[in-house]
Amino acid sequence: MSKLFAPLLISVIATTAAAQPAREPVPEGSVAFWGITYLDESLQTEMLGEDPAELDRIEMLETMVTDRFSASGMEMLDTSEVEGQVKNVVNPAKCYGCDTRAAAELGADYSLVGEVQKVSNLILSMNLQLRDAETGEMVRGRVVDIRDNSDAAWRRGMDYILRNTFFMEEEE
């Protein structure tokens, strides 16, 4: 590397390091969890029909998320009182704020939404987002892709999201 580019490289590395957000503690408060939406766009399902194991996996992930947030001390609110506001929405993660408005009406501090998108039996994507109920701004969120359609792969994907985005300081 030439001496001309060395200061530029050091500057870029320093700027990148400085731009990374500090690890903040998990926000405290109450959460309205709207579950995990399953979006299946796969050819397998189109040809062979719905796989009940995948619906069971959605329930498994919802339990993982609820248990993990509860274990951290966050209060998971009963959403049945305002469920009608999001009941007919296909995907509460993409409803232009219906989730946060309903969460705010409940008195929740946060709205939590998730989704799993199946492209094929090999390619799936998971997303979990925690948003401020008052402002609608995302507090934390992550998307991961997994490359297997099994209980273990789904658990590993959600565990990665929870450990590396929501509860990272507890692991240190």
Image: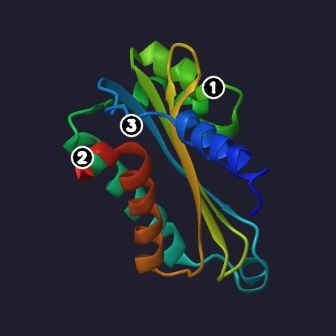
| Residue in the image at 48% along x and 22% along y | 103
The image quarter in which residue 148 lies: bottom right
**Sequence-first tag of 3 and 1:** 3
Q: What element carries label 2?
A: helix
**Between marks 3 and 1, how big is the CA–CA gap?**
29 Å
User: Residue 97 location in percent, x, y?
Assistant: 65, 25
> On screen, 136 above or below 150?
above
The residues tagged by marks 2 and 3 sit, at their Cα atoms, a distance apart of 11 Å
Residue holding disc 2: 170
Mark 1 is on which residue type?
A: Cys
Please state if 115 lies on the left or on the right of 29 as rendered.
Answer: right
The three-letter amino acid code for the residue at tag 3 is Arg
User: Which residue in the protein does label 1 denote?
Assistant: 98
Q: Residue at x 47, y 76 (%)?
A: 153
Residue that label 3 marks: 23
Say which element carries label 1.
helix
